[in-house]
Amino acid sequence: MVACFFVCANNFLKKARKENKSKKEKTEEKRRKGTKLQNIQKLTLYISSYKGIECIYNLKTDKLYGIISKSHENKRRWIFILKRGVLFYGKVAFKVLCVLALAITIIIAIVLLKYKPAYKVFVDGEQVGLVENVQEFEKYFDGKMNLIKYIAFYSVEKEPKYEFAFVSKKEEFNKDAVYNKIAENTQITYSAYAITVDGEEEAYVGNVEEAEKLVGELSKKYAKNDEDLDINIGVHQVYTQNAEDYTIDKSSLAKKEVTKVVDKKLEEEHENKKHTVNGILLAQTPVSGVITSRYGSRWGTTHKGLDIGAPIGTDIHAAGDGTVEKVVNSNVGYGNLVVISHGNGIQTYYAHCSKLYVKKGQKISAGDVIAAVGSTGDSTGPHCHFEIRIDGVATNPQQYLYNN
Ligand SMILES: [Zn+2]
């Protein structure tokens, strides 16, 4: 519109200049008819000059728009015209807007009588319900999710889509149904506290207070029972998507489970302790067989070992981890002999063997087959003469093995 007025004002000025030239001849005619200024839709402005006074008026309405003094510069002239035009179109625009606003108000009023604004909720392209307000619903969803016991966090796998619509007033909002549908497609991660025994997770409880209480109770119980045993009961937080994995709701059950594990461990440790010589574990019996002669006095001398009777060729196992210190082939005394050094001054002897399977310096693990039962050397029948020596002094093997 503004551009239009610029054009019109320019045209006016051109015409005015032209008219100025032939002013003398046409003064009378101009005064009478006036000069057409510009047609701008319905606004047809004319300019008429009389005795140096120029009048602008609307020809259609015959309404005087204003008076411009001849001394006015051209610029001011068209600013005047522009102002008038803006005023005119402003009024027209205002009227149109008023009518429009009224129409919209009436339409909204009619719509609101029958319909209500709502958000349709879609999951996976399927409409699952109606909610009144998206933000409010999301807050409701979050609140309800967080009521789930032991929830750590959740992630909605199929994000719902909301679509604004006017729906019939008869249709009801159903945020619970919508919640359920979205919750079906939500991955929940639970938080729990694992009770650990020597670093292994053995049971789970739901909250940290319960976990710490349980650990405290158990630690106290076992510290009293056996101060030497080194069993570490601890707690750490874990996350899972399967709440069923957990005994999280039943701390008494968790306590039972942990107690069972610790008791078993204690028993094992007790057992190991029995088989420990100078810190060296000798838990493996060398031969499965029958004890035919024990350690101690025998016919006026001391029998330094334990004789285990077994058929020739029966496997002889190393009693513990160590290194082969000696391998002797002989027909006298110990006969064919293996000596294993276990460290800390502990040695084990396996005598009268029929076969020797190891070499001096060889590393041995408990249970490795090192030789076969025989009757070599000073022997009256197939057996394994087994000795445990501490710093070179033989001790009763039955303090550690074959003692059940
Ligand atoms: Zn013997």
Image (cartoon, rainbow, N blue to C red):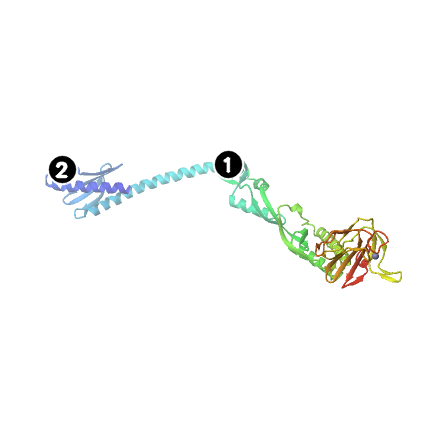
Residue 278: x percent and y percent? 75, 62
Q: Mark 1 falls on what kind of element?
A: strand
Q: Is residue 87 left or right of residue 389?
A: left
Task: Nearest to the eye among marks 2 and 1: give it.
Answer: 1
Amino acid of disc 1: Val
357 horizontally vs 109: left or right: right
The answer to whether residue 29 is seen in the rendering is: yes
Where, by quadrant of the figure, is residue 330 drawn? bottom right
* Ligand 1 quadrant assignment: bottom right
**Quadrant position of residue 221:** bottom right
Residue at (63% x, 51% y) in the render:
238
- Is the residue at mark 2 in contact range of ligand 1, meaning its CB lies under 8 Å from it? no
Query: Residue 253 placed where, x, y %?
Result: 72, 50
Which residue carries the number 1 mark?
167
Q: Work out which quarter of the rendered image holds the C terminus and state it.
A: bottom right
The quadrant holding residue 46 is: top left
Q: Nearer the viewer, residue 310 or 398?
A: 310
Q: Secondary structure at mark 2?
A: helix
Mark 2 surroundings within 10 Å by alpha-carbon count, few (fewer than 14), some (14 through 19), many (20 or more): few
Amino acid at the residue labelled 2: Glu
Instruction: Residue 221: tell me if it is visible.
Output: no
The residue lying toward the viewer, choosing from 388 and 179, is 388
Q: Nearer the viewer, residue 27 or 8?
A: 8
Tell me the distance, in whole angstroms, between the alpha carbons under discs 2 and 1.
Answer: 69 Å
Q: What residue did someone put label 2 on?
A: 29
The mark that comes first in sequence, 2 or 1, is: 2
On the image, the x and y values in percent for residue 400 come to 79, 58
Which residue appears farthest toward the front when viewing the image?
A: 331
- 273 or 279: which is nearer to us? 279
